[in-house]
Amino acid sequence: MRREFDNHPEGEVEEMVDLYVSKGMNREDAEVVIRRMAKYPEFFIDIMMVEELELQVPGEDDNPWKDGLVTFTSFVVFGVIPLLGYVAFAGTDFTSEVLFIIACVLTAIMLFTLGALKSMLTAQKWWKSGLEILAMGSFTAGVAYLIGWLVEEIIAATGTEVSC
């Protein structure tokens, strides 16, 4: 964004004017507002990121290493729980289908829990956030399962033997 503003400020100003006009402001007022903001490049670029790209400007206290560590830890903790069904019931007479269903149920519980915990950082209700993450995660898992099944079918149709 900074490079665009530095190299072609008038174009960026026009884009923002058009954006404000599309939101209901008359062109003359939009020109005044945007040109005034453009006198302050850092401020203008922050507004462009939010308004034009719908990106949140990182705060001064944001730490990408901390965010990465939290994401990694969440992935490990929430990702290992569904596998525990296979470990906990390894010595039983459960079929692979039953173990898969247990893993799916544990996955659903963890996705909902993750969403509910996410609500502590947002204004969303805990149950709504839980259902949102459950739905997105279930859809993603379903697509991944479907792709795996299709690849298996294609390999089987070609007669290629794959050993695991």
Image (cartoon, grey):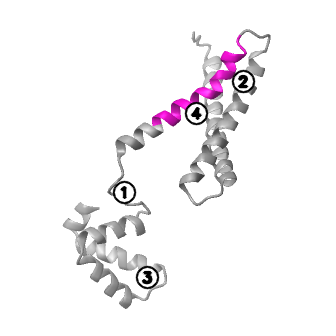
Q: Amino acid at mark 1?
A: Pro
Q: Which mark is residue 21?
A: 3
Residue sitting nearer the eye, 1 or 70: 70
Most common SS among magenta residues? helix
Gap in angstroms between the C-alphas marked 2 and 1: 41 Å
Q: Are marks 4 and 3 in contact (CB under 8 Å)?
A: no
Q: Position of residue 104 (x, y in %)?
A: 71, 30
Q: Position of residue 73 (x, y in %)?
A: 48, 34
Q: Residues within 10 Å of mark 2 (few under 14, many from 20)?
A: some
Q: Which mark is residue 78?
A: 4
Q: Are marks 4 and 1 in contact (CB under 8 Å)?
A: no
Question: Where the C terminus falls, by quadrant?
Answer: top right
Q: In this picture, which residue range is highlighted in magenta?
A: 72-90
Residue displayed at 25% across by 62% down: 2
Q: Position of residue 83 (x, y in %)?
A: 63, 23
Q: Amino acid at mark 2?
A: Phe
Q: Residues within 10 Å of mark 3 (few under 14, many from 20)?
A: some
Residue displayed at 72% across by 24% down: 100
Q: Amino acid at mark 3?
A: Val
The residue labelled by disc 2 is: 100
The residue labelled by disc 1 is: 58
Gap in angstroms between the C-alphas marked 4 and 1: 26 Å
Q: Are marks 2 and 1 in contact (CB under 8 Å)?
A: no
SS type, badge 1: loop
Q: Are marks 1 and 3 in contact (CB under 8 Å)?
A: no
Q: Name the N-terminal-most of marks 4 and 3.
A: 3
